[in-house]
Image (tube, rainbow, N blue to C red):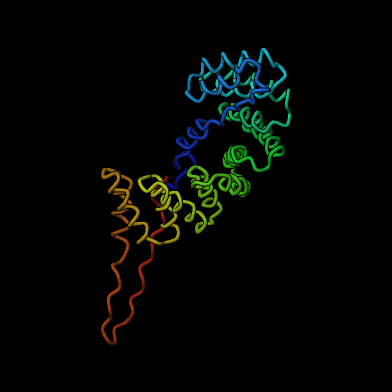
Amino acid sequence: MKRFKLLHFGFVALLTGLFMIAPPVEAARVSGDPGGHTNRGVKFARKKEYAKAIEEFTKAIDKQPRDPKNYRNRALAYRLSKQPEKAKADYDKAIELSPDSADARTGRARMLLRENKLGPALAQLDKAIESDPRDGTARRLRAYVYLQQKKWKKAIADYDIAINSIAKVDIEGRSRRGFAYRNLKQYDMALIDFSKVIDAQPKDVESYRRRVYVYRVLKQNENAIADLKTILKLKPKDADAKAQLSYLESATPPAATEKAPGAKSAKPAASPSPKAKAR
């Protein structure tokens, strides 16, 4: 079995989650919202009534065509209602009106990443982070680009900030940072991240599978066996887990028993190299 690769690591699902996370729409103060269209648009957007939200944000733009926030709001509504070309146009307009807007540049970068345009997306994210160095969303997106470019240390540096930008356990951030640590062969650090994810999501089969891989690299076969048994409790028909468990149980010697007086010490059995495909 081959070692796991980027997509086998579960990045398809993680990438989907990355683009589905929407930044908050921006409400306006009464004095800065003629007609109340921005606030009504925000209410519709929060209820996922995007067509109505777009209508209200358009009215707000008509009244305040130089205010970038309504272009950003409408761009988000267009993006979530699967109108990417209109979203890109609004993000571009918001950047034109407010070049230092981290939100607009991060939104534009999302659209570029959907088209797999890593270079242009990275340029937008660099400028977003220059404007707001603590922006966790921009850091998380840039870290993703660095992962694609196999710039593991840079990805870890961005995830360090992104992970600390939210109070709860950052499932996506820790899973990906663990992947970067794994590729740098910093297995103890990868183990910490994967274990944190498991603590937060104890029924996530793929997180156990990632940790199994690290345990096997570290030749901690007993821990790997325990995780494989957990996988099979959660997913009894998992063929990969069954194969790995069978291999490890046959290759791992039973616990040492007390030797008889004068008996020679047996050489410990060599731990097998991790050959099973992990994700």
- Residue nearest the viewer, comparing 54 with 263: 54
Task: Locate residue 225 relative to residue 43 in the image: left or right.
Answer: left
Task: Locate residue 49 relative to residue 130 in the image: left or right.
Answer: left
Report how many numbered discs are placed on residues in the image.
0
Q: Where residue 278 sits in the image (x, y, percent)?
A: 41, 47
Q: Where residue 148 sits in the image (x, y, percent)?
A: 57, 39
Position above or below: 25 against 258: above
- Residue nearest the viewer, comparing 116 with 110: 110
- Residue nearest the viewer, comparing 39 with 62: 39
For image coordinates 53% across by 55% down, the residue present is: 185
Q: Is residue 1 visible?
A: no
For image coordinates 61% across by 29% down, the residue present is: 107
For image coordinates 41% across by 55% down, the residue present is: 274
- Residue nearest the viewer, comparing 251 with 196: 196
Query: In the displayed image of the protein, which residue is found farthest to the front?
Result: 31
Task: Locate residue 49 relative to residue 68 in the image: left or right.
Answer: left
Which image quarter is the C terminus in? top left
Q: Where residue 128 sits in the image (x, y, percent)?
A: 68, 35
Q: Where residue 272 sits in the image (x, y, percent)?
A: 38, 60
- State the image quarter where residue 39 is shown: top right
Query: In the displayed image of the protein, which residue is found farthest to the bottom?
Result: 262
Q: Is residue 185 visible?
A: yes
For image coordinates 47% across by 23% down, the residue present is: 47
